[in-house]
Amino acid sequence: MTAPRPPATARKVLGRLSLPERTIVADALRTETVGGVLLLVAAIAALIWANVPALHESYESVSHFHLGPEALGLNLSIAHWAADGLLAVFFFVAGIELKRELVAGDLRDPRAAALPVVAALCGMAVPALVYTVTTLTGGGDLGGWAVPTATDIAFALAVLAVIGTSLPSALRAFLLTLAVVDDLFAILIIAVFFTESIDFAALGGAVAGLAVFWALLRKEVRGWYVYVPLALVIWALMYNSGVHATIAGVAMGLMLRCTTREGEEHSPGERIEHLVRPLSAGLAVPLFALFSAGVTVSGGALGDVFTRPETLGVVLGLVVGKTIGIFGGTWLTVRFTRASLSEDLAWADVFAVASLAGIGFTVSLLIGELAFEGDQTLTDEIKAAVLTGSLIAATLATVLLKLRNAVYRRIYEAEERDEDSDGIPDIYEQDDPAYHLRMAEIHERKAAEHRRIAAEMARERAAQTDPVHHRTAEVPGGAGEDGAGPA
């Protein structure tokens, strides 16, 4: 008779990260958080610059100032350079992130990848559906269906930095992976739905350039002076092809090797990402925000956001659609894969992070510009809707996360505790006998010190309560009451 099989242990989702993954995620989030704060500053500066009457004209003049070689089809406005040029750097970093996740991160394991992929897909499909239903009901333009589908990870992390929540690393990593998958599908949406005409000669040149880029990487040719000029040529050809130029950035990012070989501490992709991410988060994205978020805001304009079907669809898509989509996708994945949520977390935490993902800024603004190109009034109203929806989502997430912050702080402190001071959090060393021996020595030294202190305190108390010792202490030398001689 065959012995019965032991019951399979339920797979945990949103559990503690491995130490290497935790380190990589922490480095990425640290840079994105700083970039997110700069993004907030840039967005506020843009709103002030565009809405102060004395400054408004200068904002328009700078935004629409053209520069670049006309012969190459690159005589673009400053705002256009920011959207098509600088954001290519942002998507280059997104491409590297996606490649690393696919070959070395959570997306490498199909079972682990199912959660963020399904959550991200639902988090894009439901907002698009909410926008479509809202717009159809109000008889509006369906062209902006993709606007509320994007999550801005930098803006979301900036909100976490401002409110000071100790969100556990597993939830931060989930948010980061969601945004990476989100960016991938946003790029596909831009490439498929916002390419009106294609210049096949320019596109063929861009593809040939990408092939050369790939061949140089395979032959391990080094030197920025080789790759940067080639990347600029690929970008220019992609722009002139009619396909959005940011596609070139993500394509080059996906080509980088993100696995380590013998003798390498970091892969080429990780090294380049480490160098380029500060440029993306600290310069490219804030400058894009500066020249994209400058919409005229008035009481009437804000009122129109909630009355016009297109803008209301964007707000509801970001606030309601994103939250329901990501939460629902996560719940369905856990339900149908027979997994279980980490015991440290509750579904309320997933709902809070899902609401935080409703902050759609950078890519949402870009898609808004592409969706309603040629209608400046509607474009500005869509931008105002993106800002409004993101602000509402940020406020909702702040309230929900603050309600659970005591729980997060306890998890965070446990993740960070390093009592043996070896640079590795104790929680990752529970299965290492050497760790427990070190901790035994530490506790023995502490116990010996406490015994010494207790013995000294006992001697002091005995001295204070011993009447013979007390009298001797009061009459040193044994003098009598009159001090004339010995007692």
Image (cartoon, rainbow, N blue to C red):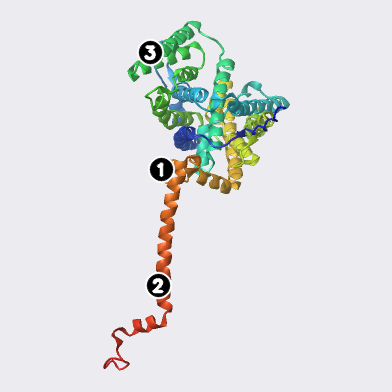
Does dot 2 land on a helix, a strand or a loop?
helix
Q: Quadrant of the C terminus?
A: bottom left
Does dot 1 land on a helix, a strand or a loop?
loop
Q: Quadrant of the N terminus?
A: top right
Give the number of the mark in front: 1 or 2: 2
Residue topped by disc 1? 422
Q: Which amino acid lies under the numbered mark 2 shown in the image of this protein?
A: Glu
Q: Nearer the viewer, residue 447 or 232?
A: 447
- How crowded pointer 1 is (Cα within 10 Å; few <14, some 14-19, many 20+) is rated as few
Is residue 21 shown left or right of residue 227? right
Residue with the most extreme front position: 1
Give the number of the mark in front: 2 or 3: 2
Is residue 320 shown left or right of residue 453? right
Q: Position of residue 95 (x, y in %)?
A: 49, 22
At 29% across and 89% down in the image, what residue appears?
479
Q: Is residue 125 above or below residue 296?
A: above
Give the number of the mark in front: 3 or 1: 1
Distance (Cα) linking label 2 and label 3: 77 Å
Residue topped by disc 2? 460
Q: Position of residue 389 (x, y in %)?
A: 60, 35
Distance (Cα) linking label 3 and label 1: 39 Å
Distance (Cα) linking label 1 and label 2: 38 Å
Q: Position of residue 11 (x, y in %)?
A: 62, 32
Residue 7 location, quadrant: top right
For marks 3 and 1, the one nearer the N-term is: 3
Q: Position of residue 296 (x, y in %)?
A: 54, 33
- How crowded pointer 2 is (Cα within 10 Å; few <14, some 14-19, many 20+) is rated as few
Contact, mark 3 vs mark 1 (Cβ under 8 Å): no
- Would residue 130 be seen by someone viewing this image from the given angle? yes
Q: Which amino acid lies under the numbered mark 1 shown in the image of this protein?
A: Asp
Residue topped by disc 3? 219
At 45% across and 43% down in the image, what residue appears?
435
